[in-house]
Amino acid sequence: MSILKVEDLKKYFIVPQGVVRAVDGIDFSLEEGETLALVGESGSGKTTTAHVVMGFYTATSGSVKYRDIEIGYTPIEKRPLELRKEIQIVFQDPATSLNPKKNVKDIIDTAIKIHRKGLSSVERLKFMLSLLEHIGLSEDLLFKKPHELGGGEKQLVALARALAPGPRLLILDEPTSALDISAQARVLNALKKIQEERKISYLLITHDLGVVRNLATYVAIMYLGKIYEYAHVDEFFNRPLHPYTQMLLSSIPTLTEEEEKLLPQRILSRGEIPSPMNPPSGCRFHPRCPFAMDICKKKEPPTMIIKSEHGSHTVKCWLYVNAHERNLNKA
């Protein structure tokens, strides 16, 4: 069963200069206990998508359904408490998402008080200590304030606060980008352990392909407000189809020739992502694509379904439309 289903979602912002088409008609679904990674450069629309799901923004049009309940047009402050309990978020920078005036105990206890009414102070403390132990934090941190914690510890406290209500869907907005390598590993291990034990679904927003490889079940590649490829994580790394996907994978740094051989055909990044206020006609990636044809500049490609042992693998690219038509003509 899909815990989250997004259909033809659009989110536009009106600014003095015109209309920013941050998200411009996307579709995806997220199953129970799985992780969907929305991947793309800054300005691709992935964070805006997450914020619509969370209720920080409301949709311009389309549909966002959580367990068959339409939530796309209801801001977070107007959502029922039970719904807010089930959808939580971990932000990119814990230094700005944690109250600097409160200690760890008070930060987590606030979430418990709101969403687990009826627990006594002793019961709340027992629950909190169990939660901290579960994600690998010591109770010695309870009375420390955020500035006294390391980066990984801060993010784990933010994770504990998000888990305290008992969510079924957790939005992870660049959860490791502000951390060093060892702290990243600690947070990722905690996230994997929690998902295995609690069957929580993750909507992961990231540009870090290492995090994608370690945490994602499926990957959706976003560019200028649209999804151009959707695949199982194994397909994403082993058989990337869209030139933009190949470009992203080509940008992974390598240290050895063996690692270099694992990457797809190298496609160097050309130019910068255009403004979502004035996106290119046709395929929005065509100004940066080394394989662009005339039709790419004129018409947006349809979504092609590619056979895969892992289920749906879709791509929006004229290269595959033309290849499909050639195969039909041969037949």
Image (tube, grey):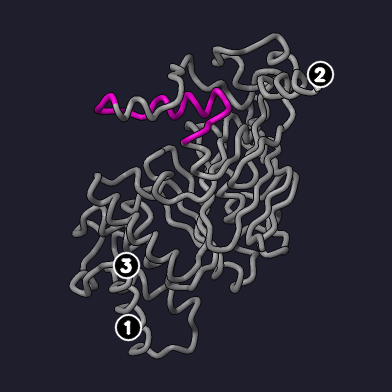
Instruction: Looking at the picture, tell me which residue is in the foreground, 157 or 291.
Output: 291
Q: Which residue is mark 1?
A: 125
What percent of the width, then of the height, locates residue 316?
67, 29
- Looking at the rendered structure, the kind of residue marked 3 is Ile
**Are there few (<14), some (14-19), or many (20+) residues within 10 Å of tag 2?**
few
Q: Nearer the viewer, residue 89 or 198?
A: 198
Is 25 displayed left or right of 179 in the figure? Answer: right
Picture quadrant of residue 86: bottom right
The span from disc 2 to disc 3 (Cα, nearest Å) is 57 Å
**C-beta proximity under 8 Å, tags 2 and 3:** no
Q: Say the numbered circle drawn on residue 135.
A: 3
Judged from the image, the secondary structure of the residue bearing numbered disc 3 is helix
- Mark 1: secondary structure: helix
Image point (40%, 90%), residue name: 120
Q: Quadrant of the N terminus?
A: bottom right
Pinpoint residue 41: horizontal percent, then vertical percent: 48, 31
